[in-house]
Image (spheres, rainbow, N blue to C red):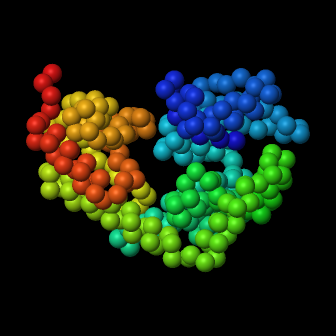
């Protein structure tokens, strides 16, 4: 059982580490001790349940590279791929641009035997905050989740369920319209920054855009540059360092404002770029 999370105290109590807390609770309930294993790039613990041994794993690679840790453990213990369950979060299934089609894990032959996939109306139908979605794939896992949910709650507030059903049945073109809104925002941001001499590849999906810190500001690092943009340009971006070591040197834009506000942000960024880096 693999609990995903990001190592380090800055993430310890954040929602990103729900997976770590899940396997921590399982280990604590079985009085199992964690051990750092470099060959697995993570922490492992062994528990026994029903006369069988189970391994718990917390990758230390940050979420984006967790597959490296998982695959090392599978190879070492000779666990066959069909003995593993993959949970694929397909939240951005419908937000893709320029002909790109995000692949579903269920397209892979045999995937229904070893995987389930989560879909949400949060992004595609702009139902953020209501947390309406569904899971498809391995029938045994879906059935187990349904049983677990029946023990934990009574379901989502019924009017929200009805709204979701109506959206799926009567507004099938909404995801296309939502996607076009984000594509237009992406173009407003990327084209505007390119004119301001900050060019980077346009993202082919999601509601985010990643950009390398401009060369004149690279020595500042992503956090200091983000703070500088907020102070001097009145624009908030996420420093890449917050997503792990691989994010350092980048910042992330969220395409959550309308095009007018995005153009306003571009003007603020342009002023910062023209002024150059602050004196050290």
Q: Position of residue 222 (x, y in %)?
A: 30, 35
Q: Nearer the viewer, residue 113 or 95?
A: 95
Q: Nearer the viewer, residue 217 or 236?
A: 236
Compared across the picture, whether 256 is left or right of 73 comes to left
Picture quadrant where residue 34 is located = top right
Residue shown at 64%/76% (left/top)? 169
Residue shown at 41%/35% (left/top)? 242
Residue shown at 49%/26% (left/top)? 10
Compared across the picture, whether 132 is left or right of 152 comes to left
Above or below, comparing residue 20 to residue 268 in the picture: above
Q: Position of residue 57 (x, y in %)?
A: 65, 36
Q: Position of residue 252 (x, y in %)?
A: 35, 45
Q: Position of residue 137 (x, y in %)?
A: 70, 64
Res 39 visible: no
Q: Nearer the viewer, residue 182 or 197?
A: 182
Residue shown at 34%/48% (left/top)? 253
Picture quadrant where residue 184 is located = bottom left
Compared across the picture, whether 234 is left or right of 106 comes to left
Res 10 visible: yes
């Amino acid at each position: 059982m693999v609990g995903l999370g990001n190592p380090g105290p800055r993430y310890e109590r954040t929602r990103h580490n729900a997976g770590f807390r899940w396997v921590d609770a399982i280990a604590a309930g079985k009085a199992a001790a964690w051990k750092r294993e470099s060959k697995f790039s993570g922490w492992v613990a062994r528990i026994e349940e029903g006369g069988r041994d189970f391994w718990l794993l917390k990758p230390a690679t940050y979420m984006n590279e967790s597959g490296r840790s998982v695959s090392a453990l599978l190879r070492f213990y000779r666990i066959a791929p069909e003995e593993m369950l993959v949970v694929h979060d397909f939240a951005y299934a419908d937000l893709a641009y320029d002909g790109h089609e995000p692949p579903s894990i269920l397209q892979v032959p045999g995937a229904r035997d070893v995987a389930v996939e989560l879909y949400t109306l949060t992004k595609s139908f702009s139902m953020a905050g209501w947390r309406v979605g569904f899971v498809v794939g391995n029938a045994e896992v879906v059935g187990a989740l349904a049983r677990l949910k029946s023990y934990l709650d009574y379901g989502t507030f019924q009017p929200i369920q009805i709204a979701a059903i109506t959206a799926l049945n009567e507004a099938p073109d909404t995801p296309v319209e939502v996607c076009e809104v984000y594509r237009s925002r992406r173009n407003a941001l990327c084209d505007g920054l390119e004119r301001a001499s900050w060019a980077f590849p346009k993202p082919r999906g999601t509601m985010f855009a990643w950009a390398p810190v401009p060369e004149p500001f690279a020595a500042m690092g992503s956090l200091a540059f983000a703070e500088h943009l907020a102070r001097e340009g009145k624009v908030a971006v996420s420093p890449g360092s917050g997503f792990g070591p691989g994010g350092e040197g980048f910042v992330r834009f969220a395409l959550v404002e309308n095009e007018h506000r995005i153009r306003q942000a571009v003007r603020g960024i342009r002023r910062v770029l023209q002024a150059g880096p602050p004196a050290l």
